[in-house]
Image (spheres, rainbow, N blue to C red):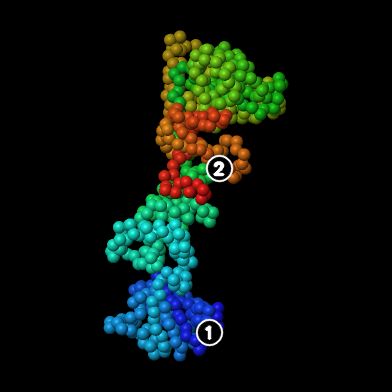
Protein backbone atom coordinates (compact mmCIF):
# COMPACT_ATOMS: atom_id res chain seq x y z
CA UNK A 1 0.00 0.00 0.00
CA UNK A 2 1.07 3.54 -0.75
CA UNK A 3 1.09 6.52 1.61
CA UNK A 4 -1.58 9.08 0.79
CA UNK A 5 -0.38 12.39 -0.65
CA UNK A 6 -2.94 15.14 0.09
CA UNK A 7 -1.54 17.22 -2.79
CA UNK A 8 -2.46 14.62 -5.41
CA UNK A 9 -5.95 13.71 -6.67
CA UNK A 10 -7.62 10.54 -5.39
CA UNK A 11 -9.55 7.81 -7.20
CA UNK A 12 -12.23 5.80 -5.44
CA UNK A 13 -13.28 2.57 -7.17
CA UNK A 14 -16.46 0.98 -5.82
CA UNK A 15 -18.63 -2.05 -6.41
CA UNK A 16 -21.64 -3.73 -4.82
CA UNK A 17 -23.09 -7.21 -4.90
CA UNK A 18 -26.35 -8.50 -3.45
CA UNK A 19 -24.84 -8.97 0.00
CA UNK A 20 -21.78 -6.69 0.35
CA UNK A 21 -20.10 -3.48 -0.79
CA UNK A 22 -16.44 -2.78 -1.46
CA UNK A 23 -14.12 0.09 -2.39
CA UNK A 24 -10.47 0.85 -3.12
CA UNK A 25 -8.74 4.21 -2.53
CA UNK A 26 -5.95 4.85 -5.07
CA UNK A 27 -3.47 7.55 -6.18
CA UNK A 28 -1.09 7.92 -9.12
CA UNK A 29 2.50 8.64 -7.98
CA UNK A 30 3.89 8.65 -11.52
CA UNK A 31 3.93 4.90 -12.13
CA UNK A 32 0.23 4.28 -12.45
CA UNK A 33 -2.47 3.96 -9.85
CA UNK A 34 -1.39 2.47 -6.53
CA UNK A 35 -3.77 1.35 -3.76
CA UNK A 36 -3.83 3.38 -0.57
CA UNK A 37 -6.58 1.53 1.33
CA UNK A 38 -9.23 -1.17 0.92
CA UNK A 39 -12.69 -1.28 2.46
CA UNK A 40 -15.62 -3.72 2.42
CA UNK A 41 -18.54 -4.70 4.61
CA UNK A 42 -21.68 -6.82 4.52
CA UNK A 43 -24.97 -5.13 3.84
CA UNK A 44 -27.55 -4.91 6.56
CA UNK A 45 -30.80 -6.78 5.99
CA UNK A 46 -32.65 -3.61 4.92
CA UNK A 47 -29.85 -2.59 2.55
CA UNK A 48 -30.09 -5.91 0.74
CA UNK A 49 -33.56 -4.88 -0.40
CA UNK A 50 -32.26 -1.74 -2.14
CA UNK A 51 -32.50 -1.60 -5.94
CA UNK A 52 -29.22 -2.14 -7.79
CA UNK A 53 -28.41 1.55 -8.39
CA UNK A 54 -28.97 2.33 -4.69
CA UNK A 55 -26.63 -0.49 -3.68
CA UNK A 56 -23.95 0.93 -5.95
CA UNK A 57 -24.56 4.43 -4.56
CA UNK A 58 -24.36 3.02 -1.01
CA UNK A 59 -20.85 1.79 -1.78
CA UNK A 60 -19.81 5.31 -2.88
CA UNK A 61 -21.28 7.03 0.17
CA UNK A 62 -19.74 4.47 2.52
CA UNK A 63 -16.30 4.96 0.93
CA UNK A 64 -16.47 8.75 1.36
CA UNK A 65 -17.49 8.36 5.02
CA UNK A 66 -14.66 5.92 5.77
CA UNK A 67 -11.97 7.98 3.99
CA UNK A 68 -13.32 11.44 4.82
CA UNK A 69 -9.97 12.43 6.34
CA UNK A 70 -8.30 11.86 2.96
CA UNK A 71 -11.02 13.08 0.59
CA UNK A 72 -12.14 16.35 2.21
CA UNK A 73 -10.74 19.20 0.13
CA UNK A 74 -9.17 16.90 -2.47
CA UNK A 75 -10.09 16.28 -6.10
CA UNK A 76 -11.81 12.90 -6.20
CA UNK A 77 -12.77 10.76 -9.18
CA UNK A 78 -15.24 7.97 -8.42
CA UNK A 79 -15.28 4.99 -10.77
CA UNK A 80 -18.28 2.66 -10.71
CA UNK A 81 -19.54 -0.09 -13.00
CA UNK A 82 -23.11 1.26 -12.76
CA UNK A 83 -23.38 3.69 -15.67
CA UNK A 84 -26.54 5.54 -14.56
CA UNK A 85 -24.78 6.99 -11.49
CA UNK A 86 -22.88 9.37 -13.81
CA UNK A 87 -26.12 11.26 -14.32
CA UNK A 88 -27.38 11.16 -10.73
CA UNK A 89 -27.12 14.95 -10.28
CA UNK A 90 -29.19 15.60 -13.39
CA UNK A 91 -32.06 13.25 -12.53
CA UNK A 92 -35.23 15.17 -11.59
CA UNK A 93 -36.93 12.43 -9.54
CA UNK A 94 -34.81 11.21 -6.67
CA UNK A 95 -36.08 9.25 -3.68
CA UNK A 96 -35.47 10.63 -0.16
CA UNK A 97 -32.52 8.31 0.42
CA UNK A 98 -30.79 9.45 -2.79
CA UNK A 99 -31.44 13.11 -1.94
CA UNK A 100 -29.89 12.62 1.51
CA UNK A 101 -26.81 10.88 0.07
CA UNK A 102 -26.37 13.47 -2.68
CA UNK A 103 -26.65 16.32 -0.17
CA UNK A 104 -23.93 14.72 1.98
CA UNK A 105 -21.53 14.36 -0.94
CA UNK A 106 -22.17 17.80 -2.47
CA UNK A 107 -21.73 19.64 0.81
CA UNK A 108 -18.48 17.95 1.88
CA UNK A 109 -16.50 16.87 -1.18
CA UNK A 110 -15.34 17.85 -4.65
CA UNK A 111 -15.86 14.83 -6.86
CA UNK A 112 -17.02 13.47 -10.20
CA UNK A 113 -18.48 10.05 -11.02
CA UNK A 114 -17.28 8.15 -14.11
CA UNK A 115 -18.20 4.78 -15.55
CA UNK A 116 -15.72 1.88 -15.45
CA UNK A 117 -16.61 -1.41 -17.12
CA UNK A 118 -17.38 -4.10 -14.55
CA UNK A 119 -15.00 -6.69 -16.00
CA UNK A 120 -12.08 -4.42 -15.03
CA UNK A 121 -13.33 -3.35 -11.61
CA UNK A 122 -10.71 -4.02 -8.94
CA UNK A 123 -13.27 -3.54 -6.15
CA UNK A 124 -15.34 -6.46 -7.39
CA UNK A 125 -13.43 -8.90 -5.18
CA UNK A 126 -14.22 -6.86 -2.07
CA UNK A 127 -17.98 -6.97 -2.62
CA UNK A 128 -18.27 -10.74 -2.95
CA UNK A 129 -17.80 -13.76 -0.68
CA UNK A 130 -14.61 -15.65 -1.55
CA UNK A 131 -16.53 -18.67 -2.81
CA UNK A 132 -18.61 -16.60 -5.22
CA UNK A 133 -15.54 -14.74 -6.36
CA UNK A 134 -13.82 -18.05 -7.09
CA UNK A 135 -16.77 -19.09 -9.23
CA UNK A 136 -16.61 -15.85 -11.20
CA UNK A 137 -12.86 -16.14 -11.68
CA UNK A 138 -13.19 -19.74 -12.89
CA UNK A 139 -15.90 -18.72 -15.33
CA UNK A 140 -13.90 -15.77 -16.65
CA UNK A 141 -10.26 -16.93 -16.50
CA UNK A 142 -10.70 -20.44 -17.91
CA UNK A 143 -10.76 -19.92 -21.70
CA UNK A 144 -12.85 -23.04 -22.27
CA UNK A 145 -15.45 -22.18 -19.65
CA UNK A 146 -15.51 -18.52 -20.66
CA UNK A 147 -16.20 -19.49 -24.27
CA UNK A 148 -18.86 -22.00 -23.23
CA UNK A 149 -20.61 -19.40 -21.08
CA UNK A 150 -20.59 -16.91 -23.96
CA UNK A 151 -21.87 -19.49 -26.44
CA UNK A 152 -24.47 -20.79 -23.99
CA UNK A 153 -25.90 -17.37 -23.25
CA UNK A 154 -26.12 -16.55 -26.96
CA UNK A 155 -27.95 -19.76 -27.88
CA UNK A 156 -30.16 -20.33 -24.85
CA UNK A 157 -33.60 -18.87 -25.70
CA UNK A 158 -34.09 -17.95 -22.04
CA UNK A 159 -31.24 -15.45 -22.25
CA UNK A 160 -31.90 -14.17 -25.75
CA UNK A 161 -34.95 -12.38 -24.34
CA UNK A 162 -34.03 -12.05 -20.69
CA UNK A 163 -36.41 -9.29 -19.66
CA UNK A 164 -38.84 -11.71 -18.03
CA UNK A 165 -36.19 -13.57 -16.00
CA UNK A 166 -35.26 -12.90 -12.35
CA UNK A 167 -31.65 -12.23 -13.33
CA UNK A 168 -29.10 -9.45 -13.38
CA UNK A 169 -26.07 -9.10 -15.64
CA UNK A 170 -22.58 -8.24 -14.47
CA UNK A 171 -19.40 -8.50 -16.58
CA UNK A 172 -21.17 -10.60 -19.15
CA UNK A 173 -22.31 -13.13 -16.53
CA UNK A 174 -25.94 -13.63 -15.53
CA UNK A 175 -26.82 -13.85 -11.84
CA UNK A 176 -29.91 -15.18 -10.15
CA UNK A 177 -31.67 -12.34 -8.31
CA UNK A 178 -32.55 -14.25 -5.16
CA UNK A 179 -30.18 -12.80 -2.58
CA UNK A 180 -27.58 -15.52 -3.19
CA UNK A 181 -25.70 -13.91 -6.08
CA UNK A 182 -25.25 -17.23 -7.90
CA UNK A 183 -24.29 -17.50 -11.55
CA UNK A 184 -27.16 -18.68 -13.74
CA UNK A 185 -25.69 -21.30 -16.06
CA UNK A 186 -27.17 -21.47 -19.58
CA UNK A 187 -28.68 -24.63 -21.02
CA UNK A 188 -25.49 -26.10 -22.43
CA UNK A 189 -24.85 -29.73 -21.49
CA UNK A 190 -21.06 -29.68 -21.86
CA UNK A 191 -20.73 -26.55 -19.72
CA UNK A 192 -22.91 -27.92 -16.95
CA UNK A 193 -21.04 -31.24 -16.91
CA UNK A 194 -17.70 -29.43 -16.63
CA UNK A 195 -18.98 -27.45 -13.66
CA UNK A 196 -20.25 -30.61 -11.93
CA UNK A 197 -16.90 -32.23 -12.67
CA UNK A 198 -15.13 -29.37 -10.91
CA UNK A 199 -17.06 -29.92 -7.65
CA UNK A 200 -17.07 -33.74 -7.79
CA UNK A 201 -14.10 -35.28 -9.61
CA UNK A 202 -11.12 -33.15 -8.63
CA UNK A 203 -8.77 -33.95 -5.75
CA UNK A 204 -10.13 -30.91 -3.92
CA UNK A 205 -13.69 -32.18 -4.24
CA UNK A 206 -13.37 -35.73 -2.94
CA UNK A 207 -15.86 -37.68 -5.09
CA UNK A 208 -18.64 -37.16 -2.56
CA UNK A 209 -22.23 -38.28 -3.12
CA UNK A 210 -25.17 -36.46 -4.63
CA UNK A 211 -26.09 -34.31 -1.61
CA UNK A 212 -22.62 -32.89 -0.93
CA UNK A 213 -21.86 -32.44 -4.63
CA UNK A 214 -25.14 -30.60 -5.16
CA UNK A 215 -24.60 -28.29 -2.18
CA UNK A 216 -21.05 -27.49 -3.30
CA UNK A 217 -22.35 -26.60 -6.76
CA UNK A 218 -25.27 -24.55 -5.43
CA UNK A 219 -22.87 -22.25 -3.58
CA UNK A 220 -21.78 -20.80 -6.90
CA UNK A 221 -24.22 -21.73 -9.67
CA UNK A 222 -27.86 -22.20 -10.51
CA UNK A 223 -29.82 -23.78 -13.34
CA UNK A 224 -33.17 -25.57 -13.52
CA UNK A 225 -33.06 -29.35 -12.85
CA UNK A 226 -29.67 -29.16 -11.14
CA UNK A 227 -30.66 -32.07 -8.88
CA UNK A 228 -31.41 -34.37 -11.81
CA UNK A 229 -28.17 -33.49 -13.60
CA UNK A 230 -26.05 -34.05 -10.48
CA UNK A 231 -27.79 -37.35 -9.71
CA UNK A 232 -27.16 -38.59 -13.25
CA UNK A 233 -23.53 -37.46 -13.21
CA UNK A 234 -22.65 -38.97 -9.81
CA UNK A 235 -24.47 -42.24 -10.54
CA UNK A 236 -22.34 -42.72 -13.67
CA UNK A 237 -19.03 -41.78 -12.03
CA UNK A 238 -16.68 -44.69 -12.88
CA UNK A 239 -14.50 -44.03 -9.84
CA UNK A 240 -17.37 -43.89 -7.33
CA UNK A 241 -18.98 -47.03 -8.73
CA UNK A 242 -15.82 -49.07 -8.22
CA UNK A 243 -14.36 -47.54 -5.08
CA UNK A 244 -17.34 -47.00 -2.79
CA UNK A 245 -19.06 -49.61 -0.65
CA UNK A 246 -22.82 -49.94 -0.75
CA UNK A 247 -24.69 -48.88 2.39
CA UNK A 248 -28.04 -50.16 1.17
CA UNK A 249 -29.69 -53.44 2.10
CA UNK A 250 -28.24 -56.49 0.28
CA UNK A 251 -29.93 -57.33 -2.98
CA UNK A 252 -31.64 -60.58 -3.84
CA UNK A 253 -34.73 -61.87 -2.06
CA UNK A 254 -34.55 -65.31 -0.44
CA UNK A 255 -35.27 -68.16 -2.86
CA UNK A 256 -35.99 -71.28 -0.74
CA UNK A 257 -35.84 -74.67 -2.43
CA UNK A 258 -39.01 -76.69 -2.87
CA UNK A 259 -39.02 -79.61 -0.37
CA UNK A 260 -38.72 -83.14 -1.84
CA UNK A 261 -41.63 -85.57 -1.60
CA UNK A 262 -39.65 -88.64 -0.50
CA UNK A 263 -36.71 -89.24 1.87
CA UNK A 264 -33.21 -89.13 0.39
CA UNK A 265 -34.31 -87.73 -2.94
CA UNK A 266 -32.44 -84.52 -2.31
CA UNK A 267 -29.41 -84.32 0.01
CA UNK A 268 -26.95 -81.63 1.00
CA UNK A 269 -23.31 -82.18 1.97
CA UNK A 270 -20.31 -80.29 3.30
CA UNK A 271 -17.07 -80.77 5.22
CA UNK A 272 -16.35 -79.65 8.76
CA UNK A 273 -12.60 -79.10 9.04
CA UNK A 274 -10.12 -77.80 11.58
CA UNK A 275 -10.86 -80.45 14.23
CA UNK A 276 -8.06 -81.90 16.39
CA UNK A 277 -6.70 -85.23 15.17
CA UNK A 278 -8.86 -88.06 16.53
CA UNK A 279 -8.01 -91.61 17.52
CA UNK A 280 -7.68 -92.64 13.86
CA UNK A 281 -5.90 -89.49 12.79
CA UNK A 282 -9.01 -87.94 11.23
CA UNK A 283 -9.38 -84.16 11.51
CA UNK A 284 -12.55 -83.52 9.49
CA UNK A 285 -16.13 -84.74 9.11
CA UNK A 286 -18.23 -85.23 5.98
CA UNK A 287 -21.77 -84.12 6.85
CA UNK A 288 -24.67 -85.33 4.68
CA UNK A 289 -28.27 -84.22 5.39
CA UNK A 290 -31.57 -85.33 3.86
CA UNK A 291 -33.69 -82.29 3.00
CA UNK A 292 -37.05 -83.91 3.84
CA UNK A 293 -36.48 -85.90 7.04
CA UNK A 294 -33.48 -83.81 8.21
CA UNK A 295 -31.59 -87.05 8.97
CA UNK A 296 -27.83 -86.52 9.02
CA UNK A 297 -24.80 -88.77 8.73
CA UNK A 298 -21.44 -87.75 10.20
CA UNK A 299 -18.53 -89.54 8.50
CA UNK A 300 -15.04 -88.87 9.94
CA UNK A 301 -12.27 -88.27 7.40
CA UNK A 302 -9.09 -86.31 6.85
CA UNK A 303 -8.75 -82.80 5.46
CA UNK A 304 -6.53 -84.22 2.70
CA UNK A 305 -9.28 -86.54 1.43
CA UNK A 306 -9.42 -86.79 -2.37
CA UNK A 307 -12.43 -86.70 -4.67
CA UNK A 308 -12.23 -90.47 -5.18
CA UNK A 309 -12.03 -91.11 -1.44
CA UNK A 310 -14.97 -88.76 -0.90
CA UNK A 311 -17.05 -90.71 -3.41
CA UNK A 312 -16.24 -94.01 -1.68
CA UNK A 313 -17.06 -92.51 1.73
CA UNK A 314 -20.39 -91.16 0.46
CA UNK A 315 -21.33 -94.54 -1.00
CA UNK A 316 -20.44 -96.43 2.19
CA UNK A 317 -22.19 -93.89 4.40
CA UNK A 318 -25.29 -92.90 2.41
CA UNK A 319 -25.82 -95.02 -0.68
CA UNK A 320 -25.61 -98.38 1.13
CA UNK A 321 -28.38 -97.26 3.49
CA UNK A 322 -30.63 -95.06 1.35
CA UNK A 323 -29.77 -95.66 -2.29
CA UNK A 324 -28.62 -93.26 -5.02
CA UNK A 325 -29.93 -89.72 -4.39
CA UNK A 326 -31.37 -88.03 -7.49
CA UNK A 327 -29.85 -84.67 -6.47
CA UNK A 328 -26.92 -83.48 -4.32
CA UNK A 329 -26.34 -79.88 -3.20
CA UNK A 330 -22.84 -78.81 -2.15
CA UNK A 331 -20.51 -75.85 -2.14
CA UNK A 332 -17.72 -75.43 -4.69
CA UNK A 333 -15.08 -77.40 -2.83
CA UNK A 334 -12.46 -78.57 -5.38
CA UNK A 335 -13.36 -82.19 -4.55
CA UNK A 336 -16.99 -81.58 -5.53
CA UNK A 337 -16.14 -79.71 -8.72
CA UNK A 338 -13.49 -82.22 -9.86
CA UNK A 339 -14.00 -84.16 -13.07
CA UNK A 340 -13.90 -87.49 -11.21
CA UNK A 341 -16.72 -86.49 -8.85
CA UNK A 342 -18.91 -85.12 -11.64
CA UNK A 343 -18.30 -88.09 -13.95
CA UNK A 344 -19.07 -90.55 -11.14
CA UNK A 345 -22.47 -89.08 -10.37
CA UNK A 346 -23.27 -88.49 -14.03
CA UNK A 347 -23.07 -92.29 -14.51
CA UNK A 348 -25.54 -92.75 -11.65
CA UNK A 349 -27.89 -90.10 -13.05
CA UNK A 350 -27.50 -87.82 -10.02
CA UNK A 351 -27.92 -84.10 -10.60
CA UNK A 352 -25.22 -82.02 -8.91
CA UNK A 353 -26.21 -78.55 -7.72
CA UNK A 354 -23.56 -76.12 -6.52
CA UNK A 355 -23.85 -72.95 -4.49
CA UNK A 356 -23.01 -69.75 -6.34
CA UNK A 357 -19.48 -68.42 -5.90
CA UNK A 358 -18.76 -66.98 -2.44
CA UNK A 359 -22.35 -67.48 -1.30
CA UNK A 360 -22.56 -70.42 1.16
CA UNK A 361 -26.13 -69.46 2.14
CA UNK A 362 -27.27 -71.58 -0.82
CA UNK A 363 -26.62 -74.68 1.34
CA UNK A 364 -27.88 -73.19 4.56
CA UNK A 365 -29.25 -76.52 5.84
CA UNK A 366 -25.85 -78.22 6.01
CA UNK A 367 -24.23 -75.08 7.41
CA UNK A 368 -26.73 -75.14 10.29
CA UNK A 369 -26.22 -78.88 10.84
CA UNK A 370 -22.46 -78.31 10.97
CA UNK A 371 -22.95 -75.80 13.76
CA UNK A 372 -25.13 -78.25 15.69
CA UNK A 373 -22.59 -81.06 15.29
CA UNK A 374 -19.75 -78.83 16.50
CA UNK A 375 -21.87 -77.85 19.50
CA UNK A 376 -22.54 -81.54 20.29
CA UNK A 377 -18.80 -82.25 20.25
CA UNK A 378 -18.06 -79.31 22.56
CA UNK A 379 -20.77 -80.26 25.07
CA UNK A 380 -20.37 -84.07 25.04
CA UNK A 381 -16.66 -84.62 24.57
CA UNK A 382 -14.52 -83.19 27.39
CA UNK A 383 -11.43 -84.77 25.85
CA UNK A 384 -11.33 -82.97 22.51
CA UNK A 385 -8.99 -85.57 20.97
CA UNK A 386 -11.60 -88.33 21.46
CA UNK A 387 -14.37 -86.69 19.43
CA UNK A 388 -14.09 -89.44 16.80
CA UNK A 389 -14.97 -92.10 19.38
CA UNK A 390 -18.23 -90.43 20.41
CA UNK A 391 -19.26 -89.22 16.92
CA UNK A 392 -21.60 -92.24 16.24
CA UNK A 393 -23.50 -91.51 19.46
CA UNK A 394 -23.70 -87.82 18.59
CA UNK A 395 -25.15 -88.73 15.19
CA UNK A 396 -27.73 -90.91 16.94
CA UNK A 397 -28.72 -88.13 19.35
CA UNK A 398 -29.06 -85.66 16.48
CA UNK A 399 -31.33 -87.97 14.47
CA UNK A 400 -33.39 -88.91 17.52
CA UNK A 401 -34.19 -85.30 18.42
CA UNK A 402 -37.42 -83.82 16.99
CA UNK A 403 -36.78 -81.28 14.26
CA UNK A 404 -38.02 -77.75 14.96
CA UNK A 405 -39.30 -77.66 11.38
CA UNK A 406 -41.10 -81.03 11.01
CA UNK A 407 -41.97 -81.66 14.70
CA UNK A 408 -40.77 -85.25 14.20
CA UNK A 409 -37.40 -86.86 14.69
CA UNK A 410 -35.45 -87.76 11.54
CA UNK A 411 -35.62 -91.41 12.68
CA UNK A 412 -39.41 -91.38 12.69
CA UNK A 413 -39.78 -89.75 9.26
CA UNK A 414 -37.32 -92.28 7.81
CA UNK A 415 -38.50 -95.51 9.45
CA UNK A 416 -41.96 -94.77 10.81
CA UNK A 417 -40.89 -95.27 14.44
CA UNK A 418 -38.51 -93.83 16.98
CA UNK A 419 -35.57 -95.97 18.08
CA UNK A 420 -35.37 -97.70 21.41
CA UNK A 421 -33.45 -95.82 24.06
CA UNK A 422 -32.73 -96.79 27.68
CA UNK A 423 -35.63 -94.77 29.03
CA UNK A 424 -38.11 -96.64 26.80
CA UNK A 425 -37.06 -100.26 27.56
CA UNK A 426 -39.74 -100.69 30.27
CA UNK A 427 -42.52 -99.18 28.17
CA UNK A 428 -44.76 -101.67 26.37
CA UNK A 429 -44.54 -100.98 22.67
CA UNK A 430 -47.57 -100.77 20.43
CA UNK A 431 -47.17 -102.51 17.07
CA UNK A 432 -49.60 -100.93 14.55
CA UNK A 433 -51.22 -102.86 11.75
CA UNK A 434 -49.35 -102.62 8.44
CA UNK A 435 -52.01 -100.47 6.79
CA UNK A 436 -52.11 -98.13 9.76
CA UNK A 437 -48.31 -97.97 9.83
CA UNK A 438 -48.07 -97.01 6.16
CA UNK A 439 -50.82 -94.40 6.45
CA UNK A 440 -49.35 -92.81 9.57
CA UNK A 441 -45.88 -92.63 8.07
CA UNK A 442 -47.15 -91.11 4.83
CA UNK A 443 -49.26 -88.63 6.77
CA UNK A 444 -46.23 -87.63 8.84
CA UNK A 445 -44.14 -87.14 5.72
CA UNK A 446 -46.85 -85.13 3.97
CA UNK A 447 -47.16 -83.00 7.07
CA UNK A 448 -43.37 -82.58 7.11
CA UNK A 449 -43.45 -81.27 3.53
CA UNK A 450 -46.17 -78.80 4.49
CA UNK A 451 -44.26 -77.67 7.58
CA UNK A 452 -41.03 -77.26 5.60
CA UNK A 453 -42.87 -75.05 3.11
CA UNK A 454 -44.31 -73.04 5.99
CA UNK A 455 -40.88 -72.69 7.61
CA UNK A 456 -39.40 -71.61 4.27
CA UNK A 457 -42.10 -68.97 3.88
CA UNK A 458 -41.43 -67.66 7.40
CA UNK A 459 -37.68 -67.61 6.81
CA UNK A 460 -38.21 -65.81 3.51
CA UNK A 461 -40.46 -63.20 5.09
CA UNK A 462 -37.95 -62.35 7.81
CA UNK A 463 -34.94 -62.50 5.50
CA UNK A 464 -36.56 -60.23 2.94
CA UNK A 465 -37.09 -57.56 5.60
CA UNK A 466 -33.35 -56.98 5.41
CA UNK A 467 -33.02 -57.38 1.65
CA UNK A 468 -34.24 -55.55 -1.42
CA UNK A 469 -35.45 -56.93 -4.69
CA UNK A 470 -33.47 -56.34 -7.86
CA UNK A 471 -33.97 -57.43 -11.44
CA UNK A 472 -30.95 -58.22 -13.57
CA UNK A 473 -31.15 -59.32 -17.18
CA UNK A 474 -29.01 -61.13 -19.72
CA UNK A 475 -26.64 -58.72 -21.45
CA UNK A 476 -26.63 -56.23 -18.58
CA UNK A 477 -23.30 -54.82 -17.38
CA UNK A 478 -22.52 -55.29 -13.69
CA UNK A 479 -19.66 -54.75 -11.25
CA UNK A 480 -18.37 -57.61 -9.06
CA UNK A 481 -17.64 -57.25 -5.33
CA UNK A 482 -13.91 -57.71 -4.70
CA UNK A 483 -14.12 -58.82 -1.05
CA UNK A 484 -13.57 -62.47 -2.03
CA UNK A 485 -11.01 -61.84 -4.78
CA UNK A 486 -7.25 -61.95 -4.39
CA UNK A 487 -5.99 -58.55 -5.48
CA UNK A 488 -2.42 -57.20 -5.15
CA UNK A 489 -3.55 -54.32 -2.95
CA UNK A 490 -4.08 -53.81 0.79
CA UNK A 491 -7.60 -54.75 1.78
CA UNK A 492 -8.50 -51.25 3.00
CA UNK A 493 -7.29 -49.52 -0.18
CA UNK A 494 -8.37 -51.83 -2.94
CA UNK A 495 -11.44 -51.10 -5.10
CA UNK A 496 -14.70 -52.34 -3.63
CA UNK A 497 -15.92 -53.48 -7.05
CA UNK A 498 -14.29 -54.44 -10.33
CA UNK A 499 -15.60 -54.70 -13.87
CA UNK A 500 -17.87 -54.11 -15.62
CA UNK A 501 -18.74 -57.64 -16.78
CA UNK A 502 -21.61 -58.75 -18.99
CA UNK A 503 -24.28 -61.11 -17.69
CA UNK A 504 -24.25 -64.14 -19.99
CA UNK A 505 -27.23 -65.82 -18.38
CA UNK A 506 -29.52 -65.48 -15.38
CA UNK A 507 -29.29 -69.00 -13.94
CA UNK A 508 -31.93 -68.18 -11.31
CA UNK A 509 -33.66 -64.92 -10.40
CA UNK A 510 -30.81 -64.29 -7.92
CA UNK A 511 -27.84 -65.98 -9.64
CA UNK A 512 -26.04 -64.51 -12.65
CA UNK A 513 -23.44 -66.10 -14.89
CA UNK A 514 -20.80 -63.54 -15.89
CA UNK A 515 -18.35 -63.35 -18.77
CA UNK A 516 -15.04 -63.11 -16.89
CA UNK A 517 -11.50 -62.76 -18.29
CA UNK A 518 -10.02 -66.06 -19.49
CA UNK A 519 -7.17 -65.92 -16.98
CA UNK A 520 -9.49 -65.61 -13.97
CA UNK A 521 -9.56 -69.03 -12.35
CA UNK A 522 -12.78 -68.58 -10.41
CA UNK A 523 -16.32 -69.76 -10.92
CA UNK A 524 -18.44 -67.40 -13.00
CA UNK A 525 -21.83 -67.76 -11.26
CA UNK A 526 -22.53 -65.20 -8.54
CA UNK A 527 -25.39 -64.26 -6.26
CA UNK A 528 -26.81 -60.83 -7.06
CA UNK A 529 -25.81 -59.58 -3.58
CA UNK A 530 -22.20 -59.62 -4.86
CA UNK A 531 -23.09 -57.60 -7.96
CA UNK A 532 -23.80 -53.92 -8.57
CA UNK A 533 -25.51 -52.66 -11.75
CA UNK A 534 -23.02 -50.63 -13.78
CA UNK A 535 -24.17 -47.20 -14.97
CA UNK A 536 -22.43 -46.33 -18.27
CA UNK A 537 -21.08 -42.80 -18.53
CA UNK A 538 -22.93 -41.11 -21.40
CA UNK A 539 -21.75 -37.59 -20.61
CA UNK A 540 -20.05 -35.41 -23.21
CA UNK A 541 -16.87 -35.47 -21.10
CA UNK A 542 -16.75 -39.23 -20.46
CA UNK A 543 -13.21 -39.76 -21.78
CA UNK A 544 -11.83 -36.60 -20.20
CA UNK A 545 -13.52 -37.63 -16.97
CA UNK A 546 -11.42 -40.77 -16.64
CA UNK A 547 -8.23 -38.78 -17.18
CA UNK A 548 -9.44 -36.13 -14.74
CA UNK A 549 -9.95 -38.72 -12.00
Which quadrant of the figure has residue 287? top right
> Residue shown at 43%/35% (left/top)?
476
Give the crowd class for mark 2: few <14, some 14-19, many >=20 residues within 10 Å.
many
Residue 495, numbered circle: 2
Q: From the viewer's perspective, is 283 left or right of 455?
A: right
> Residue shown at 62%/39% (left/top)?
488
Above/below status of 393 relative to 86: above
> Residue shown at 62%/16% (left/top)?
308
Q: Which residue is mark 1?
A: 4
**Residue 266, percent across and down?**
49, 19
Above/below status of 291 relative to 168: above
The N terminus is located in which quarter?
bottom right
| Mark 1 touches mark 2? (CB < 8 Å) | no
Please tell me which residue lies in front, 26 or 429. Answer: 26
Q: Earlier in the sequence, mark 1 or mark 2?
A: 1
Q: Looking at this rendering, what residue extends furthest in the front direction?
A: 30
Q: From the viewer's perspective, is 182 left or right of 201?
A: left
Residue 116 visible in the shown view = yes
**Residue 223, percent across and down?**
37, 57
Residue 361 visible in the shown view = no
Q: Looking at this rendering, what residue extends furthest in the top direction?
A: 434
**Residue 52, percent across and down?**
35, 73
* Foreground label between 1 and 2: 1
Please tell me which residue lies in front, 269 or 409. Answer: 269
Per the image, label 1 sits on a secondary structure element best described as loop
Give the alpha-carbon distance from disc 1 to disc 2, as whole Å. Answer: 61 Å
**Residue 222, percent across and down?**
39, 59
Amino acid sequence: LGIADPERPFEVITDASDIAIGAVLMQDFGNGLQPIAYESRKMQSAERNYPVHDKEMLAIVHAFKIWRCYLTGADVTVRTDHKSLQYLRAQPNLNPRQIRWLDYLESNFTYKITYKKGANNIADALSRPSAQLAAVLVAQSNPLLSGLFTHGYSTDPFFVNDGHLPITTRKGVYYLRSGTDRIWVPSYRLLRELLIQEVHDSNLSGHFGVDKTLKALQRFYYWPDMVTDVQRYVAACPICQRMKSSHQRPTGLLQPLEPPQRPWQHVTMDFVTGLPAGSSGNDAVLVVVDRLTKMAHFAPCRTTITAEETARLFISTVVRLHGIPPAIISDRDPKFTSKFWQDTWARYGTRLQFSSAYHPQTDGQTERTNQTMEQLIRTNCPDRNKWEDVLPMLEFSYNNAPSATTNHSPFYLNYGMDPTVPISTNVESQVPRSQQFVEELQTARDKAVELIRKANATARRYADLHRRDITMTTGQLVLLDTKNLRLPLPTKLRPRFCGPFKIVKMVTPVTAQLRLPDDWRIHNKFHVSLLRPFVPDTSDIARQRLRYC
